Amino acid sequence: MILRARQFEFTFPRPALVMGVVNVTPDSFSDGGNFFDPAAAVAHALELVAQGADVIDVGGESTRPKAEPVSEAEELRRVIPVIEALAGKIKQPISIDTVKPAVARAALAAGASIVNDVGANRTDDAMWRLVAESGVGYVVMHMQGTPQTMQANPVYADVVREVGEFFAERLAKLAAVGVAREQVMLDVGIGFGKTLEHNLQLLAGLGSFTRLGRPLLLGVSRKSFVSKLLGTTAGDRLPAVLACTTLAAAAGVQMFRTHDVAATVQALRMTEAVAAFK
């Protein structure tokens, strides 16, 4: 199985990839404001690369529950200077975390190679046509509703089955506009329109999504479902997140989006070293 993102190509099976998070926002749920200054964001990204990040994911609009949307102009002001600076400094692919096609287009022109789309439940195809024409990687994330509404009352008859059906339907729509399967990754969207029980069911069922033949991306980093289950503080979720990471790697997940790159890399390499002896 191959993932292509412009000039980058990853062939699986291989060691799991780590996507380091750079939030250029004042209001993200875990680190909002820490890297709002472009210079601070670039310095943080370089540190994540030094810790072992294989991909850097840059986002300028918070997608936490009930987050207020930002204008296209403001999102561009936040992310483009960071991407332009990083494109000249790192060899790793840069991902743009956005739902806006115009922001994605500008980010790709600035040097990004992947579009991480939490709004892949969209009805228009402008983003998909951009992905098709540019040959970039594309992350299809499942979300019920929008960041403003997603946690109001998420309901599923069978969350694993329904997310799988969503992926199959999206893959067909992407193919119809010219997006190659080799460009696509799938993300079940932990915490995006899901209750604690839904999140746990998806984590337990991750292996079922491997039948779709596309790499899986998982984002559990610092998510609030850990505190809902274990009663931990927001700053004390890493051990549980690493447990999810190692279980997911064993289930076949190929990329992990995280704020804590060094710890995630260690957990994955140990998991893989043990699995090599099975």
Image (spheres, grey):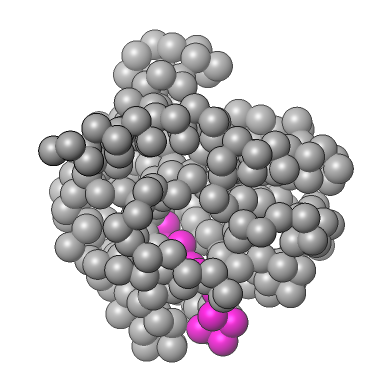
Q: Is residue 135 magenta?
A: yes
* Above/below status of 236 relative to 110: above
**Viewer-closest of 202 and 48:** 48
Q: How many marks?
A: 0
Going 25% across and 49% down the picture, which residue do you hit?
A: 252
Residue 256: x and y in percent read: 43, 44
**Viewer-closest of 176 and 19:** 19
Residue that sits furthest to the front in the current view: 277
Going 50% across and 56% down the picture, which residue do you hit?
A: 118
- Quadrant of the rendering where the C terminus is positioned: top left
Span highlighted in magenta in the image: 132-141
* Above/below status of 119 relative to 8: above
Q: Is residue 111 in view from this perspective?
A: yes
Asked which quadrant contains residue 36, the reply is: top right
Decide if residue 158 is on the left or right side of residue 247: left
Decide if residue 42 is on the left or right side of residue 125: right
